[in-house]
Amino acid sequence: MIILAGATLSILGLIGIIYSIIAVARAKRAKLDDAELRARLGKLLPINLAALLVSVIGLMLVVVGIVLA
């Protein structure tokens, strides 16, 4: 059960990271000036960090589940 929960969290974190990558690529393609680009990337940074944290917690749960199994 722990392994399944960890895998689910890891997948959700990976989806968030992929979303961040796509959003940054779109922002760079939009040819925004420096201030607007920084503002948009500043809004994406917390999403990216949260997705990374969720993914790491999920991977930790998978490892704990494997060790306990």
Image (cartoon, rainbow, N blue to C red):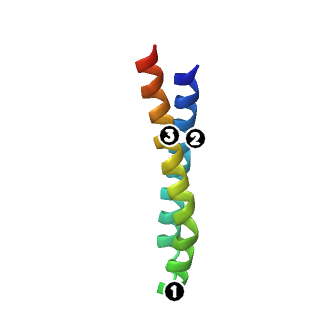
Distance between the alpha carbons at the discs numbered 2 and 1: 31 Å
- Label 1 sits on a secondary structure element that is helix
> Of label 2 and label 1, which has the lower sequence position?
2
> Identity of the amino acid at label 3?
Ile
Question: Residue 63: x and y, percent?
Answer: 42, 27
Disc 3 target residue: 57
Question: Residue 9: x and y, percent?
Answer: 56, 36
Between 45 and 61, the residue placed more toward the observer is 61
> Of label 2 and label 3, which has the lower sequence position?
2
Question: Residue 16: x and y, percent?
Answer: 55, 49
> Identity of the amino acid at label 2?
Leu
> Identity of the amino acid at label 1?
Ala
Disc 1 target residue: 35
Picture disc at residue 12: 2
Q: Is residue 36 above or below residue 13?
A: below
Distance between the alpha carbons at the discs numbered 2 and 3: 11 Å
- Residue in view at x 45 percent, y 34 percent: 60
**Disc 3: CA contacts within 10 A as few (<14), some (14-19) or many (>=20):** some
Picture disc at residue 61: none
- Label 2 sits on a secondary structure element that is helix
Question: Residue 23: x and y, percent?
Answer: 54, 62
- Specify the quadrant that holds the N terminus: top right
Tell me, yes or no, whether the two marked residues, 1 and 3, touch with CB atoms within 8 Å.
Answer: no
Tell me, yes or no, whether the two marked residues, 2 and 1, touch with CB atoms within 8 Å.
Answer: no
Tell me, yes or no, whether the two marked residues, 2 and 3, touch with CB atoms within 8 Å.
Answer: no
Q: Is residue 5 above or below residue 14?
A: above
- Residue in view at x 53 percent, y 74 percent: 30
